Image: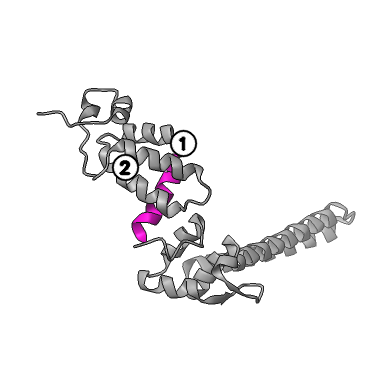
Amino acid sequence: MAKKNVSKTDIVIATTPEAVEIVNTSQRSLEEITLDVKRSWKNVQSSGYEIGCYLNEAKPLFGKHGLWLKWLHSVGIEKRTAQRLMQIAQNYPNATIVSHLGDTKSLKLLKLPEDERNSFVEESHMTVAGVMKKVEKMTTREFEDAINTYLGLPTKSQNKDSEISIDLKVDKINKSLINVLQLINNCNDENERDRVIHFLRDICDDVILALDKIKAA
């Protein structure tokens, strides 16, 4: 089997005979793509979409996963970051819709059907605080809440408030139990203490029965 023509950059990365078997399905060499990735990665004006396109162009040139990771390391991009940028580039036909969103919002927008994303980002949406905002002015939390509201799902803020409410109720129950135990320990009348203990046992039995019914429902 004839060896494929590889660039100098390819040879540096290909450290084994098998690795040299790089199938170049791109119109450009790996060396050219590498230069574009490094240039874009250092340029704060470059979009994640642009870098993701370059990464998607480069990955098919590597037959082995380990070589791909070595190349990512050589251009200074972490694996997870690369996956996020490539996902953005793969899921949007062009950079127009996500050019003003940033990488995190662009990924969260994928929760919406493809044909509804453009109209969503063009409209203003009500935040949990009751303020109308354009999506580019929203925080990441506000943006995610707006998407969940649009889809009819609970928002992160609502879930957080619910968790806080439950925690407060559990805390009150714990404090009440501590107070009851202190009352029993401080009770000098043995008969009175026995009556309180008997009363508490009856309450516990009722609670256990109620929990069993809820579990069985």
- Left or right position of 206 against 184: left
Please give left or right for residue 183 compared with residue 94 in the image. Answer: right
What percent of the width, then of the height, locates residue 184? 82, 55
Q: Which amino acid, by three-letter code, is at mark 2?
A: Ala
Q: Secondary structure at mark 1?
A: loop
Q: What residue did someone put label 1 on?
A: 76
Q: What stretch of residues is rendered in magenta?
A: 78-92
Comparing 118 with 113, the one in front is 118
Q: Amino acid at mark 1?
A: Gly
69 versus 216 height, above or below:
above
Q: Residue at x 26, y 39 (%)?
A: 61
Q: Residue at x 11, y 29 (%)?
A: 2
Circle 2/circle 1 CB separation < 8 Å:
no
Tag shown at residue 58: 2
Q: Position of residue 56 (x, y in %)?
A: 33, 47
Q: Earlier in the sequence, mark 2 or mark 1?
A: 2
Which residue does the image show at 45% across and 62% down from the upper left?
Answer: 98
- In the image, is residue 126 part of the stretch drawn in magenta? no
